[in-house]
């Protein structure tokens, strides 16, 4: 081979290698990759993203950014994808980065096959992650808040007065721990007895709970059938109650305006109320009301009914919601049965499920359909309608409607430091679509007095999105308490 031929062959090999490098670096589609799929996506911001940036699905590179154009105040990207990529009508895109300081790329979420194929000339909706400037802005705001807190602490705790305050706080903590130590030592016997009672109760519950649960399940099934058959009537009753509350609100506003004028002595009624003769007549009327309440109490006893009224509320800090209820327990004298009727405020609202048949057609004429289910929560007013039985002096079971859904409950009471404690476990809403588990609620009530109690518990532990610990308080009154309150009201006038 002549020297010229050798040089020509060497140059040819070099050009081939150079061409391969150009195809690789420029990502020029050849062969099977030549027939590229072109898709457009619109983003509010693509800062840091350049042309030829990678396009990925589930982290796998499937194409590149062919063009970046400005359309109004948004960026329009033209994406060149591999021909075997399949996108659907609900596909979306977003700008992501590899690590904190890595290169940015376009991540495509291909969508679901049920939504149908991506139409021709469709533009994907894109989203951008928070930028480094956003992070710096948030960090600056946090730094300002921290600075204000430290300045407040310096003003409060700095200097000799601050040192004196800290010493006083430490002395108080030392006295508190000493008092707690004495309290625990003085009540060690009661604590041990309580633990023994808990152990005996758990053993009894272990033996009896399966039989009780079986009976409660049968009762819950029956109640659920009854509620299902009368659901329309219940919806109508709730609508009537809502209308009644609106009218009562208007009436209360009118009464407030009237009583304000009466208190100022305006009008004929105001002059009469501020007259001493009128006050004497009012006292006589209240005495008659007191006698009427006593007569009503006697009639209730004759009819063998006993009432317990109550109001309670609790907060769910983890989800920023609250729950409250007002109602009564109606006991049949001489039996272990009672009925509970309560109006309650629902933390998340009442569930409504709608089902819709959706049909779509492909370009080739094929059609398909599927059922789309939508769950909404509306109307935060609900009700509790339950029947309960006393199994032992401090053990109760309940079944019926809990916040508009069928459920069961177990109440167990005991004494702690000479105060009554009631532990309640409720399970309801067995067929909710969001979670294949019922709504559980565990609550403990510590009665500070016979009427006032504090509560703590855990709500819906099986559903991570709604679960939260609870803190609350409430009041309960019996027949005698209600009569005494009315009597005190009469004496005050």
Image (tube, rainbow, N blue to C red):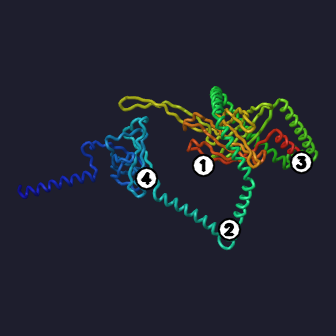
Secondary structure beneath label 3: loop
Residue of label 1? 318
- Give the CA separation, mark 1 to mark 3: 51 Å
Residue 161: percent from left, percent from top: 69, 72
**Left or right side of 128 for 252:** right
Secondary structure beneath label 1: loop
Q: Nearer the viewer, mark 1 or mark 4?
A: 1
Disc with the residue nearer the chain's start (2 vs 4): 4
Residue of label 2? 166
**Left or right side of 144 for 2:** left
Label 4: few (<14), some (14–19) or many (≥20) C-alpha neighbours in 10 Å: some
Q: Nearer the viewer, mark 2 or mark 1?
A: 2
Residue of label 4? 45
Front-most of residues 197 and 275: 197
Disc with the residue nearer the chain's start (1 vs 3): 3
Residue 229: percent from left, percent from top: 63, 26
């Amino acid at each position: 081979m002549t020297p010229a031929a050798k040089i020509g062959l060497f140059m040819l090999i070099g050009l081939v290698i150079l061409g391969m490098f150009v195809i690789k670096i420029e990502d020029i589609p050849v062969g099977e990759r030549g027939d590229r799929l072109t898709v457009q996506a619109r983003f509010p911001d693509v800062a840091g993203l350049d042309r030829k940036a990678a396009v990925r699905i589930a982290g796998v590179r499937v194409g590149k950014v062919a063009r970046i154009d400005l359309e109004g105040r948004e960026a329009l990207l033209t994406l060149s994808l591999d021909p075997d990529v399949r996108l659907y009508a609900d596909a979306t895109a977003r700008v992501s980065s590899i690590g904190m300081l890595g290169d940015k790329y376009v991540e495509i979420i291909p969508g679901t096959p049920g939504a149908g194929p991506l139409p021709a000339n469709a533009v994907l909706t894109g989203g951008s992650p928070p930028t480094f400037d956003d992070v710096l802005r948030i960090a600056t705001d946090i730094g300002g808040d921290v600075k204000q807190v430290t300045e407040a602490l310096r003003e409060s705790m700095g200097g000799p007065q601050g040192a004196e305050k800290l010493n006083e706080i430490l002395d108080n903590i030392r006295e508190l721990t000493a008092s707690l130590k004495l309290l625990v030592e003085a009540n060690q016997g009661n604590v041990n007895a309580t633990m023994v009672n808990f152990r005996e109760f758990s053993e009894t519950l272990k033996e009896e709970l399966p039989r009780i649960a079986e009976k409660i399940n049968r009762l819950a099934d029956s109640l659920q059938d009854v509620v299902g058959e009368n659901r329309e009537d219940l919806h109508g009753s709730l609508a009537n109650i809502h209308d009644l509350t609106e009218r009562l609100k208007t009436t209360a506003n009118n009464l407030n305006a009237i009583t304000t004028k009466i208190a100022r002595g305006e009008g004929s009624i105001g002059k009469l109320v501020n007259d001493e003769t009128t006050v004497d007549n009012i006292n006589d009327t209240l005495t008659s009301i007191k006698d009427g309440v006593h007569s009503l109490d006697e009639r209730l006893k004759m009819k063998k009914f006993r009432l317990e009224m109550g109001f309670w509320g609790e907060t769910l800090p983890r989800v920023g919601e609250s729950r409250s209820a007002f109602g009564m327990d109606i006991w049949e004298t001489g039996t272990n049965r009672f009925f509970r009727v309560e109006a309650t405020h629902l933390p998340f609202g009442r569930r409504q499920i709608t089902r819709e048949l959706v049909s779509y057609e492909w370009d080739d004429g094929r059609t398909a359909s599927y059922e789309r289910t939508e769950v909404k929560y509306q109307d935060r007013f609900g009700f509790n309608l339950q029947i309960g039985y006393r199994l032992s002096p401090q053990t109760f079971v309940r079944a019926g409607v809990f916040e508009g859904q069928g459920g069961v409950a177990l109440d167990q009471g005991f004494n702690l430091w000479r105060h009554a404690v009631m532990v309640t476990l409720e399970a309801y809403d067995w067929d909710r679509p969001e979670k294949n588990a019922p709504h559980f609620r565990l609550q403990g009530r510590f009665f500070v007095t016979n009427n006032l109690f504090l509560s703590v518990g855990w709500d819906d532990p099986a559903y991570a999105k709604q679960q939260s610990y609870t803190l609350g308080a409430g009041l309960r009154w019996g027949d005698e308490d209600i009569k005494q309150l009315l009597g005190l009201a009469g004496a005050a006038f």
